Amino acid sequence: MSLSSIAPPAVEPVSLVEVKAQLRLTATDEDALVTTLIAAAVRAVEAATDTALITRRMRLSLDAWPGDGIVAMPVGPVRSVEAIRVFDANGVAAAVDASPVRIDQSALRPRLLISGPRPSPGLPLGGIEIDHTVGFGASAAAVPDPLRLAVRMLAVRWFERRGDDEPGRGPIAADVAALLAPFRSPRLA
């Protein structure tokens, strides 16, 4: 299984203006650094929660169909499934009807139920592609406030400390981890 981005998000869930206000910065000479820290904080929050904060299109590649037809999605929330393709042994794609696909958001990790015929892929690796849209919405207003606050806290902390954290301490402090906890899926060892 592999996941790739087809279309990145159009905006970040936290703006430069918001973070600069929290930092009480008025000058523009460090805007590039703050912008980079915001992007890094967004990616850290997304990685910790297996979520996409702002809507984007993704492609999931599978080697084979799960026996029960239920595909556990690595990133959520899943908004829609646009296309499903199965490749034959020559690498020629055939479309699979995506209309009977059901999206289950009730589980901690989103799942797709692929009902109906599922042709077997002819390629041993990456023979199935599922193009889908993930994210809370297209604007920052759609992102849950605790996740936006976690992004701001990380960006501000990283700006203020500039790499001066205590040795051996992880990138996400306990207060930020507490904000992320309701959005995290449990991980099995």
Image (cartoon, grey):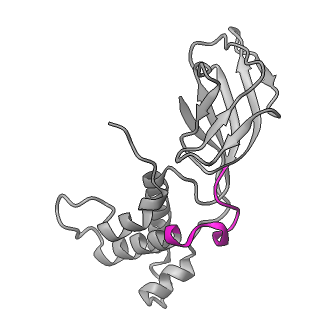
When the figure is inspected, residue 185 is found, relative to residue 150, above or below; the finding is above
What segment is highlighted magenta in the picture?
134-147
Position of 5 with respect to 30 (left or right) is right
Q: Is residue 143 magenta?
A: yes
When the figure is inspected, residue 17 is found, relative to residue 113, above or below; the finding is below
Corner quadrant of residue 64? top right
> Which residue is drawn at the image coordinates 23% and 68% (left, top)?
165
> Which residue is drawn at the image coordinates 48% and 89% (left, top)?
27
Residue 168 in picture, x, y percent from top left: 18, 58
> Which residue is drawn at the image coordinates 61% and 22% (left, top)?
68
Residue 14 in picture, x, y percent from top left: 56, 72
Residue 174 in picture, x, y percent from top left: 30, 67
When the figure is inspected, residue 69 is found, relative to residue 21, above or below; the finding is above
The front one of 2 and 114 is 114
In this figure, what is the number of numbered marks? 0
Corner quadrant of residue 94? top right
The front one of 24 and 189 is 189
When the figure is inspected, residue 139 is found, relative to residue 19, above or below; the finding is above
The front one of 121 and 21 is 121
> Which residue is drawn at the image coordinates 61% and 48% (left, top)?
106
Q: Residue furthest front?
A: 106
The C terminus appears in which quarter of the rendering?
A: top left
Q: Is residue 28 magenta?
A: no
Residue 81 in picture, x, y percent from top left: 74, 40
Position of 160 with respect to 88 (left or right) is left
